[in-house]
Amino acid sequence: MKKIVGSLLIAITGGIIAVTAYSLIINKKSNDIPADTTRYTPAYLTNMPGSVTPLVLPDFTAAASNTVHAVVHIQTEYQRKSSVYDYFFDFRDFFGERSPRSGPSPIIATGSGVIISPDGYIVTNNHVVTESDKVEVTLNDKRTFTASIIGTDPSTDLAVIKIDAKDLPYLVYGNSDQLQVGEWVLAVGNPFNLTSTVTAGIVSAKARNINILGSPDGSAIESFIQTDAAVNRGNSGGALVNTMGELVGINAAIASGTGYYAGYSFAIPVNIVRKVVEDLKEFGTIQRGFLGVSIRELDSKLAQEEGITDIRGVYVAEVTDNGSAREAGIRTGDIIINIEGIAVNSTSELLEIIGQHRPGDKVNVAVKRNNKDLTFNVTLKNRDGNTKTVKREDVDLASLLGASFEPVSKDVKSDLGIDGGLQITSLRDGKLRNAGIRQGFIITQVDGKPVKSREELAKILNGKKGGVLIEGIYPNRTRAYYGFGM
């Protein structure tokens, strides 16, 4: 009996000692943890095994503060809008278009814009202001101005407008080439006609082609930045900025079946924006440089057909006669690996890089040919096959007729069975629009004389008095005739 009682006392004493020691250890560890820190990452997520590091959350306050005052609200008025425009850009829900209530009341649409200089230059989307009869801009401080349209570019869905003001807050350009998937970005705009509103997200993807610009001649540049930052009605034309408050894109579209945000939004990269803005401010129209190739995405099927082992780059399906690439030595079947040292693995990436250059610019193009790496210095040409910039006279012509023009591409001419023509890429209030002509129309003859370039059209209309008869064809093969007075 004495042995049993002794063993029991030893066991109880050992238990008390163990509990006391455990309590002392736990209290010591608790005292080692700072009292003002509430969030920690697991030890396996840190560089030092067993260490505890505070979780650092991103701070957007400085970027938002620097951005909101440089983003404006845009309201536009239309008497009518061409059906071709609505077919190419079904953004009506996104940028807030509302149908007229009755009679001749104008259509009212809303969007956003970004101030890019202190003297009142603003960049927005082409689909926000094109064909508008009136553009009104409201600043974040509630001042309102009537804006003039400096120029538009349907091929990138960008436009530049200007208000008569000074010392305005503005955004500085970032570098969209350096933007990385997973990087934090802010979308700033005027959804629902409110003052500037900020939402946050990350870059979900780059160089997205979502086939919304619908350029009939294939000149559209679609290489969107995809983000999950929420954008809604009125955000179209607003700013996409990085955490430093630098402009990295112009919001243009959302993925939605209802017109409201459903998970993804798309922005035009700022490196394209910068070039388009410079062109429109200096020339009033776009100076496009072309590589002079037809290209295809390189996938496993094409690689098998052509005996290609390394599926990287963009496949050159055809080299244009008298084009820049042919003159430099690039051939059909070459695989473009990079341009200016930037890797290209899709047609969108290639178009984005080339779209940042003007005719006459030289670009370094690296290709793979028969498993050999070659490089070529290519001098870009315009669509007319030379390195000249568009003349000032062409800008005056566009102002006179209320339209922008591009020569018809070789593929479109072959498809429609025509040997020339001048295609209308955008329409504003003017003689052509008032005559009933719609965007996309190809002018083939004026007063019975063939038209193949802007110069020929300007020559025919120079000093013209009285009636003008225009003949042409739409991309859907519908032929049409229009008349107007000079």
Image: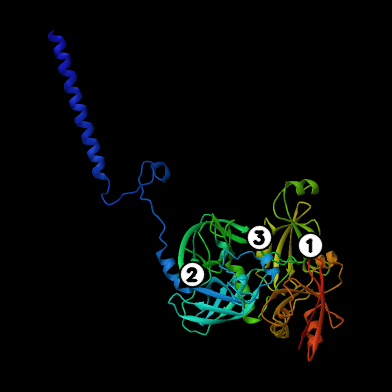
Q: Is residue 48 left or right of residue 289?
A: left
Of residues 409 and 149, which is closer to you in this image?
A: 149
The answer to whether the residue labelled 3 contacts the one labelled 1, judged by CB atoms less than 8 Å apart, is no
Res 409 → quadrant: bottom right
**Can you give x and y, in whole percent of width and height, for residue 455 in the image?**
79, 82
Calculate the distance from the C-alpha at mark 3 to the C-alpha at mark 1: 19 Å
Q: What is the total number of numbered labels drawn onto the structure image?
A: 3
Give the SS element for disc 2.
helix
Label 1 or label 2, whichever comes before in sequence order: 2
Residue name at image x 23 percent, y 44 percent: 31
Q: Is residue 70 left or right of residue 30?
A: right
**Can you give x and y, in whole percent of width and height, for residue 254 in the image?**
57, 60
Of residues 174 and 112, which is closer to you in this image?
A: 112
On residue 193, the disc is: 2
Give the SS element for disc 1.
loop
**Can you give x and y, in whole percent of width and height, for residue 145 in the image?**
51, 82
Amino acid tagged 2: Asn
The correct choice, above or below, for 240 with respect to 103 in the image is above
